[in-house]
Image (cartoon, rainbow, N blue to C red):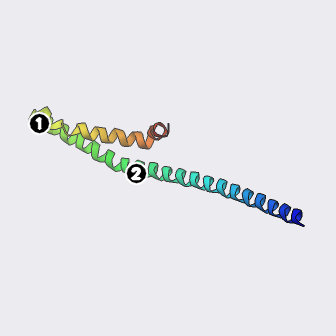
Amino acid sequence: MGFVLSKAMNDSLKGQQEFMRLQMERQLVLQNLMRERQTAMQIAWTREFLKYFGTFFGLAAVVLTTGAIKRKNPAVLLPMLPLSFVFSYQYDMGYGTLLQRIKG
């Protein structure tokens, strides 16, 4: 009688372990899917931001260059330096390999 009860408990324990293993695998798959969606949303947001910032950057470049030529003062172009860093970072994030380098 004890053997039958022990065998039933062993079978039950194996079933629970299998269920827990399957549940863990499903959670990992869901976490990976959520991470991929979040990354895709981040890239999409960056590309959308880049459209507006690129327009601003281009307009600022034209206006500052015109101002530097009219005033004959190249220091007017100084704000282009940080703007170009921001633009290149956003471009690399949206269309480049920044995310792959971060993952690596």
Identify the residue shown where x is 69% and y is 55%.
21
Question: Residue 36 location in percent, x, y?
Answer: 54, 50
Q: Horizontal placement of 20 versus 41: left or right?
A: right
Quadrant housing the N terminus: bottom right
In the displayed structure, 50 sits above or below 98; it is below
Q: For numbered disc 2, what is the local secondary structure?
A: helix
Query: Distance from label 1 to label 2 (Cα)?
Result: 34 Å
Q: Nearer the viewer, residue 81 or 9?
A: 9
Residue 3: name its quadrant.
Answer: bottom right
Q: Nearer the viewer, residue 76 or 11?
A: 11
Mark 1 burial class by Cα count in 10 Å: few <14, some 14-19, many 20+: few
Q: Horizontal placement of 73 versus 60: left or right?
A: left
**What is the three-letter code of the residue carrying label 2?**
Glu
Task: Name the residue beneath numbered marker 1.
Answer: 70
Question: Residue 87 location in percent, x, y?
Answer: 33, 41
Q: Earlier in the sequence, mark 1 or mark 2?
A: 2
Residue 15: name its quadrant.
Answer: bottom right
Identify the residue shown where x is 9% and y is 36%.
71
Q: Horizontal placement of 101 versus 70: left or right?
A: right
Question: Which residue is the extreme one toward the left?
Answer: 71
Identify the residue shown where x is 11% and y is 36%.
70
Q: Nearer the viewer, residue 20 or 102?
A: 20
Q: Horizontal placement of 66 versus 86: left or right?
A: left
Task: Name the residue beneath numbered marker 2.
Answer: 48
In the displayed structure, 81 sits above or below 26; it is above
Question: Residue 25 location in percent, x, y?
Answer: 66, 53
Residue 26: name its quadrant.
Answer: bottom right
Mark 1 or 2: in front is 2
Q: Nearer the viewer, residue 77 or 97?
A: 97
**What is the three-letter code of the residue carrying label 1?**
Lys
